[in-house]
Image (spheres, grey):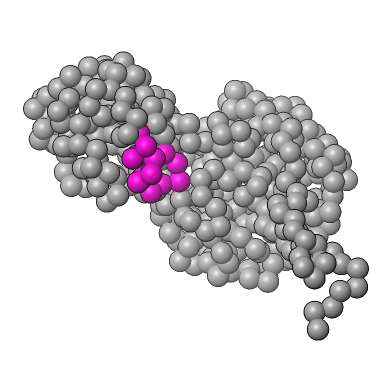
Amino acid sequence: MIDAEIAAICARARVAARKLAPVDRAAKDEALRALAKRLVDSKADILAANARDMARAESRGTSPAFLDRLALDDRRIEAMAKAVLEIADLTDPVGETITKTKRPSGIEVARVRVPIGVIAMVYEARPNVTAEASALCLKAGNAVVLRGGTEASASNAAIARVVTEALESTHLPRDAVQLVPFADRDAVRVLVQQTETVDLVIPRGGEGLIRAVTEQARVPVVQHYKGVCHMFVDVGADVETAKKLTLDGKLARPSACNALECLLVAEPDAKRLLEPIGRALTEAGCEIRGCEKTREILPNAKPATEDDWGKEYLDRILAVRVVADIGEALAHVARFGSGHTEAICTPNSAHAERWRREVDAACVTVNASTRFHDGGQFGLGAEIGIATSRLHWRGPMGLEALTTMKWVVLGDGQIRG
């Protein structure tokens, strides 16, 4: 039954995608604005559904980080609506001419952006993804099949109903956004093997989910396993700046994938830098796990083990390591980083350039928090996820990432012969 129903959902999505692809920007934006209004108008129903999900999750002893991702309130629903409106305001990439050339034969050859087609979105306890993924896919002319986590089933269903109402009220195909109704984990396997109807799978969640999707899929997958983000504090760095960047990166939202997980500090300046940073972290309730040299400066830090390097805590815990210089910092990042976000705090322009050039990650920041690696902060509107793989996209996935291209050839009777 699951196999047949999911196949039918995806087949309907394929039909809807063909209908949606030629729709102009005005019609898509009208639907998005209707969606934003309905999210706010339906706040009471969405919050009631989320309360049921939260109660069920709390009864199971779910972690605080997980509960934070699951929870909705007035502010988060309004943020969802705002994100949808921001997407409506963005330029529509569909139909954009990427390049155009005239060939010696007289033909004109262009590359044009077009929708990918049908996107399968598999995600965990982030009900805001239901609204934001729907909005992004619609704006880029794609149909989307959503398979949210069972822990957010009531919240996702409530938001999906609002999306459907917005589509129907603006005369866009209702099957352009569909929610897989099955809680069975086998539903994910079936969904990501729909090679005839699904063009791309985007998993969003923990490393276990993404690896499972990748292993089971027969459809291309955009990957983002985890966010092990580092910051290297260089010799001569301004203490207040380094402290501010560390606290924001680690504690602003510890459960986010762009949160700081490891601090690297240059040994020649470690005592001056680490004492005030460590004190500020401890006072803010952050547990420090340090190497031996770190613990000589911060004796209250817990001893770090080898498992702490490359660890994604998603909690108020920070690994700290004293390194000899920028070379050792780069080597540590190369070994333990996840390719997400890597930051440097430095007054040295040569070191800043070396960091930009040598770090292999979707995003590098210089004298700025890792928390800026976000679609909204980059001007993309809401993001459908952050890709750390190299194909076909890297970094925050906004509208452009949800398109592909086709070649268009214009002639006046030319033949190749």
The x and y percentages for residue 292 are: 10, 35
341 relative position to 82: left or right: left
The x and y percentages for residue 400 are: 65, 47
Image: magenta residue range: 352-364
164 relative position to 209: left or right: right
Query: Residue at the location (37% across, 37% down)?
Result: 353
Please, which residue is most extreme toward the right here?
Answer: 412
Q: Is residue 188 above or below residue 240?
A: below
248 relative position to 2: left or right: left
Query: Residue at the location (74% across, 58% down)?
Result: 101
Image quarter in which the N terminus is found: bottom right
Report if residue 397 is visible in the image.
Answer: yes
Tally the marks.
0
Front residue of 403/66: it is: 403
Report if residue 151 is visible in the image.
Answer: no
Query: Residue at the location (27% across, 29% down)?
Result: 233
Res. 236 image quadrant: top left
Q: Is residue 261 above or below residue 21?
A: above
Front residue of 221/231: it is: 231
The x and y percentages for residue 316 are: 32, 30
The x and y percentages for residue 411 are: 87, 67
Query: Residue at the location (31% across, 34% down)?
Result: 351
Image quarter in which the C terminus is found: bottom right
Res. 4 image quadrant: bottom right
Q: Does the segment drawn in magenta span residue 143?
A: no
Res. 368 image quadrant: top left
Front residue of 326/207: it is: 326
Please, which residue is most extreme toward the bottom here?
Answer: 417
